[in-house]
């Protein structure tokens, strides 16, 4: 389970365990995490828990929400990420049982490379996922996603990470999370929701089954479970 450590000028002010589906942060007293500072908006940001994943979303705040020095709208939090709200720093910590590996972002729109060169449809997304280790979901069956259209059509990427993020950052992004019982698909970023087998995703996340066709950011991918 994750927790937030709020500090100002290096002095820890409070620690908050993330236990609810939605945890609000802001200056108003009704927020779950109250930061009484004029640089913080009344309703500044919200943290959403989807399974073992925690996303933070800026609620159109006046001064913005930053993660590791970069302004964000909505992003998946990872162990040791530092959220900056005004002059306050909020460190996100995950207990040792929730281990993650570096996530790969699919970029199916890239041109196909010569054989033997680096795969363009996979590139690390700095700061998105930190740490390493198989986690507790190692017993899940092996799986992969195969690109069905575009320049990268026919390419297959094995899902070796606990969390794999697919899509185009800033346009439409979704995550595939490995769990002990299988794989789950969740919407991360973008106004339009991704679809599975032609049906828009309803709810926060759904389990994936062998042969499911995912479509997002104009790219179709098939989930293959072995």
Image: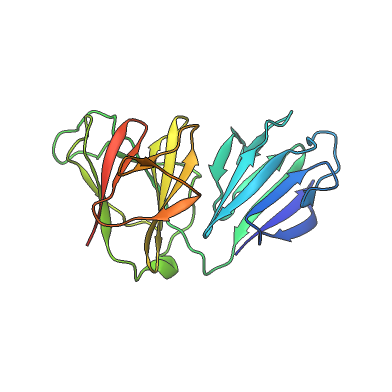
Residue at 67% over, 35% down: 59
The structure's colour scheme is rainbow
Left or right placement of residue 149 versus residue 206 in this view: left
From this view, report whether residue 123 is shown above or below residue 130.
above
- Between 58 and 223, the one nearer to me in the picture: 223
- Residue at (60, 64) in percent of width and height: 1
Give the mark count. 0
Return the x and y of residue 207 as percentages of the image width and height.
39, 57
The quadrant where residue 172 appears = top left
Residue 69 in the image: above or below residue 79: above
Is residue 10 in sight in this rendering?
Answer: no
At 72% across and 47% down in the image, what residue appears? 24
Q: Residue furthest front?
A: 199
Q: Is residue 196 left or right of residue 66?
A: left
50 left or right of 213 in image: right
Please tell me which residue lies in front, 55 or 131: 55
Percent position (x, y) of residue 63?
73, 30
């Amino acid at each position: 389970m994750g927790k937030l450590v709020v500090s100002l000028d290096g002095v820890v002010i409070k620690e908050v365990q993330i236990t609810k589906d939605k945890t609000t942060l802001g200056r108003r007293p009704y927020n779950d995490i109250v930061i009484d500072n004029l640089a913080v908006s009344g309703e500044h940001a919200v943290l959403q828990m989807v399974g073992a994943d925690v996303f933070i979303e800026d609620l159109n705040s006046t001064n913005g929400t930053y993660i590791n020095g970069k302004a964000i709208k909505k992003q998946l939090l990872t162990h040791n990420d530092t959220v900056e709200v005004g002059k306050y720093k909020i460190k996100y910590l995950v207990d040792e049982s929730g281990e993650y590996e570096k996530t790969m972002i699919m970029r199916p729109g890239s041109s196909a490379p010569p054989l033997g060169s680096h795969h363009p449809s996979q590139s690390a997304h700095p700061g998105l996922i930190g740490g390493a280790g198989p986690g507790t979901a190692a017993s899940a069956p092996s799986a992969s996603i195969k690109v069905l259209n575009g320049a990268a059509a026919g390419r297959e990427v094995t899902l070796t990470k606990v969390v794999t993020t697919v899509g185009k950052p800033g346009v439409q992004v979704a995550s595939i999370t490995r769990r002990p019982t299988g794989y789950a698909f969740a919407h991360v970023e973008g106004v339009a929701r991704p679809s599975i087998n032609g049906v828009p995703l309803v709810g926060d996340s759904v389990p994936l089954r062998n042969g499911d066709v995912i479509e997002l950011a104009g790219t179709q991918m098939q989930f293959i479970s072995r």
